[in-house]
Image (spheres, rainbow, N blue to C red):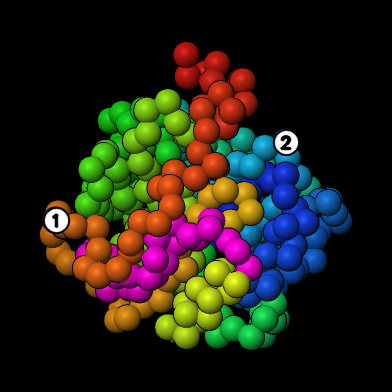
Amino acid sequence: MDIIGIGYLGFETTKLDEWRDYGPKVMGFQIGNAPESDPDSLYFKLDDRRHRIALHPGKIDRIAYIGWEARGKLEFHAAVERFRNHNIEITVGDAELCATRGVKELIRFRDPVGYQHELFYAQKWSPRSFVPGRPHGGFVCGARGVGHVVLITPEYTPELDHFLTGIMGMHWYGSGAGKGKTGFFRSKLNNQTSHDIAYGFGPGRAGVQHIGLFVSNVRDVGETYDLVKKHGHDMMMTLGQHTQDPHMSFYHFTPSGFAIECITELEPWHEDGFELNPEQLSTWGHEIVGPILGPSVKTPEEIFDPEVLALKR
């Protein structure tokens, strides 16, 4: 599938008011205009797209959907046919849902774990429309998508790997340096970063562990780091550089209990040409000062709706 990367992310939250303050003041997000069909939700712009992150009112804090961007109409319809040929259940988004997401067309589907995904093309955008919520150098989305997401799965089966690589056509990047079972995957058209999505094995657990967002420079990372501390948000990992990426980042917890990794490139990422097997997580820094699995990771019964769990039994 000719997928660029993650185009947008949607979350359910019980803390809309906290996000309304945190998003612009700490992260530098711009509050976008909510569509007429979804006036009670909070939409954040990170660049000139209509939105990149949406927060919807919910009974718990959890990820609602991951929106993957196909290159265009032809690639989108080829992907739809591929899903159908592999007997993957899909739902075609109606006109109202497409208008809410600001896209031409979309489909919805679930991965073998139960997480909701969407595939779309042609999201609305307005040139030079992004105005950060505070002085900020900007977020790097574009050719790499909005960033990456790490999900926890209560079971890690060969079916999951096959779904991502054999059906969605993603590159397998590796298992990382963690002690547990983790899989990192990169979409077909992404040659900018090591991974778009990762699944970490957590027995009896599910939920989003963190998302990674790229900013323009080291100053943006440093200023965000200071604001996180100033506003009293808990840290997961201090400033550091991962072994597998020439990037600098830190992790802190959002109002919804999952972490954001704020990242900048120290040098451009490049494909190594072989599967990495790093001996340690980071070359420097990244001291773990908080829980690796935050409050956003719960039991599957809390994260997934009953009908999703019923399908897996």
Percent position (x, y) of residue 311?
Answer: 52, 18
Cα distance between the residues tagged 1 and 2: 41 Å
Amino acid type at circle 2 is: Lys
> Image point 62% across, 49% down: which residue?
256
Percent position (x, y) of residue 186?
Answer: 34, 56
Q: What mark, if any, has residue 59 been given in the picture?
A: 2
* Residue 26 visible to the viewer: yes
> Image point 55% across, 69% down: which residue?
229
Taking depth in this image into account, of 58 and 4 the one nearest to the observer is 58
The image quadrant that residue 242 belongs to is bottom left
Residue that numbered label 1 is attached to: 279
Question: Taking 145 as reference, is 44 left or right?
Answer: right
- Could you classify mark 2 by the number of other residues whose Cα lies within 10 Å: few (under 14), some (14-19), or many (20 or more)? few
By secondary structure, the bulk of the magenta-drawn segment is best described as strand
Looking at the rendering, the stretch of residues picked out in magenta corresponds to: 231-253
Percent position (x, y) of residue 268?
Answer: 30, 79
Looking at the image, is 135 positioned above or below residue 95? below
- Could you classify mark 1 by the number of other residues whose Cα lies within 10 Å: few (under 14), some (14-19), or many (20 or more)? few
